Amino acid sequence: MTISQKSIRFLSDQDVEDLKRIELIRPYLMDRNEKIKAHNQSHGVNKGLAVNGRNLTNVGVFRKYVQEYLGQHPAVNKGMTLMVRQLQPGPEGIPLEIYAFSADKRWENYEYIMADIFDHLLAALPFFGLEIFEWPTSQILLKPPHDPNPKTS
């Protein structure tokens, strides 16, 4: 899946609290957020700007979510490689590669399992404030820009 680069951002404290409602990553967020805050405090980091110090990002937390989701998925072979990685950004966004094996070796079932996993992950993206990359359609390109202050005659 290819993530739109414009949707990647640092997470605010409120974002982290909201994401803690997702059970699969709650323990990770609690542990990681504490370590990040301790590091920033011990180094006197001015968190007036999110870019200062260590931070969680929505794409980094999503990668962890995908890893946890696949790790608990009953149809994923736990005895083989399971990896979620971010590839080099390009003009079409940031590719997120999932390397996993199905526990079921039948082709038809494999296709169903992969589709089921990607259906779930695509539906989960908005919870992390992320968007999938899509080329603009002719509908968007041909539509005149919206004027928030139209002039009346």
Image (cartoon, rainbow, N blue to C red):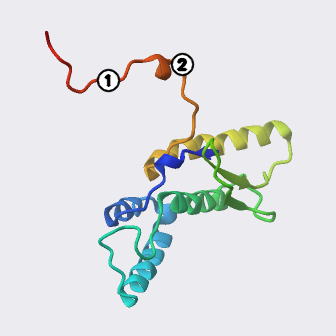
Q: Which residue is mark 1?
A: 146
Task: Give the alpha-carbon distance from disc 2 to disc 1, as whole Å.
Answer: 16 Å
In this picture, is 108 found above or below 54?
above
Q: Are marks 2 and 1 in contact (CB under 8 Å)?
A: no
Tell me which numbered mark, 2 or 1, is placed earlier along the sequence: 2
- What residue is rendered at 54% in x and 19% in y? 138
| Residue at (41% x, 68% y) in the render | 51
- Vertical relation: 152 (above or below) 50: above
Q: In the rendered structure, which amino acid carries the disc numbered 1? A: His
Q: Nearer the viewer, residue 26 or 103?
A: 26
Q: Secondary structure at mark 2?
A: helix
**Amino acid type, mark 2:** Ser
Rendered location of residue 37, percent (x, y) = 39, 80
Tell me where residue 105 appears, x and y as whole percent.
86, 47
Q: Residue at x 35, y 87 (%)?
A: 44
Residue at image coords 79%, 63%: 81
Which image quarter is the N terminus in? top right
Give me the disc on residue 2: none
**Which corner quadrant holds the C terminus?**
top left
Residue tagged 2: 138
Mark 2 residue crowding within 10 angstroms, few (<14) / some (14–19) / many (20+): few
